[in-house]
Amino acid sequence: MLILECPYCGVKAEETELANGGEAHLKRFGPGSADNDFESYMFARKNPKGVHFERWRHSYGCGKWFLAARCTATLEVFGTYPAQTAEPPADLQAKIKAKRPDWKGY
Amino acid sequence: MSTRLSKGGRLIDRTKPQTFTFNGKSMAGFAGDTLASALLANDQMLVGRSFKYHRPRGIVGSGPEEPNALVNLGTGARFEPNQRTTTTELFSGLTATSQNHWPSLEFDVGVVNNYVARFLPAGFYYKTFIHPRFAWKHVFEPIIRQSAGLGQVPKEADADRYEYAYGFADILVVGGGIAGLQAALAAAKAGARVTVLEQTAHFGGRAPVDGDVIDGKPAEEWVKATVQALSAMENVTVMARTMAVGVYDHGYVLAEEKVADHTPGDGRPKKRMWRLRVGKIITATGAIERPLAFAGNDIPGVMLAAAVRDYVVNHGVSVGDRTVVVTNNDDAYRTAIALKEAGLEVPVILDARAAVSGDLHAKARALGIRVETGKAVVKVKGGKRVTGVAIGAQAGEGSVLEEVACDAVAMSGGWSPVVHLFSHCGGKLNWDEAQAHFRPDANRAPTNQNGEAMVYAAGTANGLLTGDQVLADAVAAADAALGKASGVAAASVTVPAEGAMLPVWIMPQGAGPALKMKMWLDYQNDVKVSDVQLAAREGYTSVEHTKRYTTLGMATDQGKLSNINGLAVLANALHEDIPRVGTTTFRPPYTPVTLGALAGESRGEIFQPLRRSPIHEWHEAHGAYMEPVGLWRRPYCFTRGAESHEASVHREILNTRSNVGLLDASTLGKIIVKGPDAGKFLDMLYTNVMSNLGVGKCRYGLMCSEQGFLSDDGVVVRLSDDTWLCHTTTGGADRIHGWMEDWLQCEWWDWQVYTANVTEQYAQIAVAGPKARQLLEKLGGMDVSKAALPFMAFSEGSLGNIPARVHRISFSGELSYEIAVPASHGLALWERLIEAGQEFGVMPYGTEAMHIMRAEKGFIMIGDETDGTVIPQDLNLGWAISKKKADYLGKRGQERNYLASPDRWKLAGFETLDGSVIEDGAYIPAVGNNPNGQGNTQGRVTSTYHSPTLGKGIAMGLIHGGLGRMGEVVEFTKMDGGRVKARVVDPVFYDKEGARNDV
Amino acid sequence: MKRYSVFAIARQAMSYHQGWERAWRAPEPKKEYDAIIIGAGGHGLATAYYLGKNHGIKNVAIIEKGWLGGGNTGRNTTIIRSNYLQDPSAAIYDKALSLYETLSQDLNYNVMFSPRGLLMLAQTHHEVRGYLRTVHANQLQGVSTEWISPAKVKELVPIMNIDGPRYPVLGALYQKRGGTARHDAVAWGYARACSDMGMDIIQQTEVTGVRTEGGVVRGVETTKGYIGCKKLGIVVAGHSGQVADMAGFRLPLEAVALQALVSEPIKPTIDVVVMANTVHGYMSQSDKGELVIGGGTDSFNNYTQRGSFHHIEETLRALIETFPIISRLKMLRQWGGIVDMTGDRSPLISKTPVGNCFINCGWGTGGFKAIPGSGWAMAELMAKGEPGPLAADFNMWRFREGQFIDESVAAGVAH
């Protein structure tokens, strides 16, 4: 039963208020893109046992989408940040690296 | 025999007698009794039969660890099987019956299994019943099923109700014994918000029974004072009768409170399921005593030593006149002393240890109790009740040195901390050699969302078995959970000096196979030492394999008594260390939880949230047969008198086509999309262009998933220069709104677009039929003429003095207006339309009439023509796909080989040659079989109805080649194996020119 | 191998069962094998078994990180059915069902396959149409299934409330041949038969790397050292992504938690298996008397084998609504498993970008019922190097083409 802090409204949201949207920071490939690229965009997922960057929507709260860094093996949450972020913030990456020295990085 | 003593019993109130029945026999007890103590007070030691061999079973324990004494409780709608007597509070009028026997508890035919037990070792069923093939299902399995199971099946729906409650705390303390109370006090004094849970109705745990002295006073007084102090603090919540059943991730704890369990029918919920969200958890859950494995240790009258003590001290009940105590540790001496002090006989204490010292031993000796060291029970004598024990050397192989007559045996194999809650979220345990038990490893505690330790064990639950250590540890646990020193000093406890325990896994240690086949590990599931050894011999050497092969620890007590003993026997058989063999996984719940309590109040009408249109109540009052559509309920049709649903639907259609019909379309999704970039956004969302839609106009549009599959459709309305209103399907409203927000927030976050889901803010009514205009004109207030309001336009104004937006759109093919009004006016408008429409023959129609009318017109329906694998091109909707746009969601997906293939099945209409209706779901077979031998197919039906308008069956479907095969006759499957011939036709069956709408 | 029978038990009973031999050996790994299977769950063991039985490849090792049968094989709700909608699914699940029917005899191990019948309730009109479509599809596929009325449903399951105020039962898809089997026994039976053929089941040994040369697999690094192989099958369900990563390719998979629970045992009350997909719950009664209950999956990636509790609550609400008499029974134990979900919720039985390296995964929430068929098809793929008809459509390149095997269409369910 996860708790994630919504970076918009500041609510420590209970999992039942949230909807998961899968892996974060995927690059969209549209018309004209290569088959490989489109396939990876649609299906290839890192699916790591460990640090995972993922999308969540505060569906039954403020309605905002946000991103979270979470460990899929321990469910530890390293941080949450706005969806309008192209890649994980540097300070968050540093925090994760400090806690998980083996982490290969984003 | 077991009986009530003339005095004693700290928990019972002798001024409040309670009567109850067991197997129809009337019995008496007192308030404060458990059902188990009351049964014992009435000399009812035999209470059930075991799972496999149907051996007689008596009460063994005094708490949630009890494996045997389970009963059917209550009757009728309050009947409850497998109720544990040791945790059931007695109340007047309670009725209980014993389980798992036929015809009676005393004489059970199933006991035949016991006489052939030798042929039924662990896993015997895997090795036999193999031939003949059909015998398993039809002969052997039914016999096994009938003899397994435990309690009877309830016959009625539950008369009780249950509720959820929510709680929050910085620190949750589980356990109201002295460790829990001390930890709570320390945490609370340090300012934390604290909740304390105690599973029973009484605080204090074992300390008051064991005679601990705290701060110079009896433990009971300290407990009372501490509970009072805690209850008086504003930052503390103290709850009794509340069992923490599971610890889940991120500090989520589930706890079951018994509210009216002991006062059935008083109007309160039977149970309350607490969903607690807490910062840190302190488990002060105590320990459970282990049985000893000696032959005949399952005969009624053999009990845990501490349970024997509990019944004497707490309930004033003696379990026997002569009790032999057998132990490997000092604690059981307390039982001997308590019995002796209550005036009962203890013929001998058999201590497996060669040498014994310590205060308790000295006191027992001083009371004149005979103590035999280095001795074991070789065998318990008796059938349905203990009659004596045969004694031998623990170091021997089972030679009998002496027989002692007795009617009870109190055994203690040491204590195992209750580590369940610590383990549920992955906490790890260490093996403690000295005390022969697993205890929590604070360095490998379960972690929370911040990666910090989340659960701290305190006191006995942490493996500290004496009072002085317990309270110091409780303060330490509180400090650790607080992350700072509470500054609270632990109360001081005076304890007797105790000697070391000796791990004893079987008794006597050199016992041979014949004795081992009589040494029970798991009482309820009938797993013996010999079974675990057999599993090891056969290679089921993982502890999980052994558990599953023998069923050890899989009974309703989940191995609370058997797991450690079984594990030790397995380790010995494998010549491994116990910690290397490891434990099975601890899973919630700690003790079984009522399913109804987990479901809470969500039953019947409110089983799920109910969404009502503003006109819902009118429908219900006017014969609507409702169908669930998502969480809504929509009228499927409105029946009149004895009319069948089909007849109603046909009447509604014919009336709409000839007069005028009303459809409650309020559930349709309505999403406002507004902003400078709204047009650009909608052009990405829809396959066609929406940015160039004129203000005041409507346009039908399609939305696809990024895969390219058609996901929703509806009419888009341009309300103003920068505002569009998107209609979606009923089921799609929330999904599409979420989808829009996803793209706006996560991909095109620099686009200035705002969305609002206003589905429930408006009621929407379709007024359809040739007399629709007359009806609206009668209401008045708006020009609804063809000139003023042409097809695919809308106008805003007021209709019969109700503010309304009237759309000229049609899903039925008739002259049709969809009128949106603020939700609060919905019912008023509907009633006005019904009233004013009487002269035009107005009738409401339901979803099924809507479906059929749209099929007559060849309009697709999301969910019928689409199933998540269909693209717009398949449905001949190419006209609604912009060729000019560089991009829209789904465009790239549709470029993939399989989606762009000319071989895809495409939409066509079908008419059977005989006018019959093609069956729902029918396929169009093709010649031959595929490589897996399955019949080839070339299409399938997607919508099929009897058209009352045309008086024949009509259908739409997908077929290889699509409309290119117009005129061809194909076959559809029938469920009876037959085929029906149908011609491929234009899917627009009615009014192909659209003349009816063009008025 | 000493055969199991009632006579063998009687003989052993005379000597206190001291003479039973190991069900499977505990060998040390050899230097090289003709084939290595990673993962001794049901699918891995079945693959090995049919490699030996159907293709004569017996120099095989099955390497298992934990204990055999300890993953999803030992933690599912044991439902077996084959009335799937799409052709490739119906083919492989029906193959599996027909193998299950004789598996006890085949393995000389009673896997307790019990064709007690399986009902999938239709509780919306949409669901009715979806199941009717399945009936028609199954007819052409040669899969036995039928549509039955609410009255017949009530007759089969007297404890069911078919007139619930919210979702009355409108009928059901009924497969008489469907049912349950004892999950552990399936793994144990295959393991015993594999061991008997001379195959090595190497437990407590983790694969830590996959060695390739020129794009072709050569062997695996393990915690017991390097082991060579000519062919490699990866059959590790929830951990497929990690092992594929070692071999250097990526899979269209995500791992999520699926939960199940059992009630305390009671006397027999429900004979058939019931799945109620509108309200999200399924239930059967085991031979021990426990009600075996399953529901939905979490939506987020998770390797903890612990799920979110609200799913359990939702499932129980649904089932109490469907079976009101169970309200006063108690939940005895709940647990979770890690299921690997593909983009279309259908499995992969496929060649991979690495030569002689094959993958079998992605069974999602429905893998147990497929075990024999999956092993059969995977063995054929590994033996021949090319998929047979059962596996052909389950290749991993279908996602690029958009050629999905989507069981979630209409009212269908992918489990």
Image: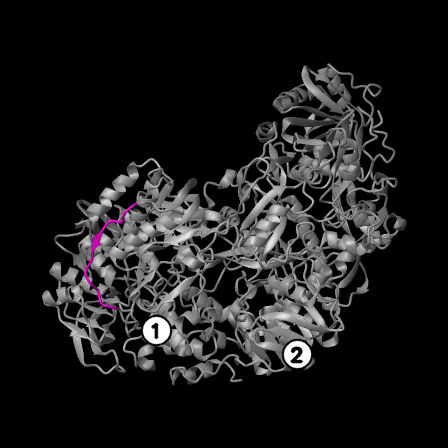
Q: Is residue B247 above or below residue B374?
A: above
| Alpha carbon distance from label 1 to label 2 | 52 Å
Kindly indicate whether the residues beneath marks 1 and 2 are on one polypeptide chain.
Answer: no
Q: Is residue A50 left or right of residue A45?
A: left
| Residue B459 falls in image quadrant | bottom left
| Residue C232 falls in image quadrant | bottom right
User: In which quadrant will I find the N terminus of chain B?
Assistant: bottom left
Q: Secondary structure at mark 1?
A: helix
Rendered image: mark on residue C366: none
- Type of amino acid under label 1: Asn
**Can residue C280 be seen from the camera position used here?**
yes
Residue B521: x and y in percent read 35, 69
| Residue linked to disc 1 | B114
Few, some or many C-alpha atoms within 10 Å of disc 2 (few <14, some 14-19, many ≥20)? many
Stretch in magenta? B488-500
| Residue linked to disc 2 | C228
| Residue C62 falls in image quadrant | bottom right
Q: Main secondary structure of the magenta part?
A: loop
Please check the rendered image and state whether residue B499 is part of the magenta-colored stretch, yes or no: yes
User: In which quadrant will I find the C terminus of chain B?
Assistant: top right
- Type of amino acid under label 2: Gly
Please check the rendered image and state whether residue C406 is part of the magenta-colored stretch, yes or no: no
Residue B139: x and y in percent read 49, 70
Q: Nearer the viewer, residue C91 or B212?
A: B212
Residue at 23% over, 53% down? B207
Residue C410: x and y in percent read 69, 49
Chain of the residue on which disc 2 is drawn: C
Residue at 68% over, 14% down? B801
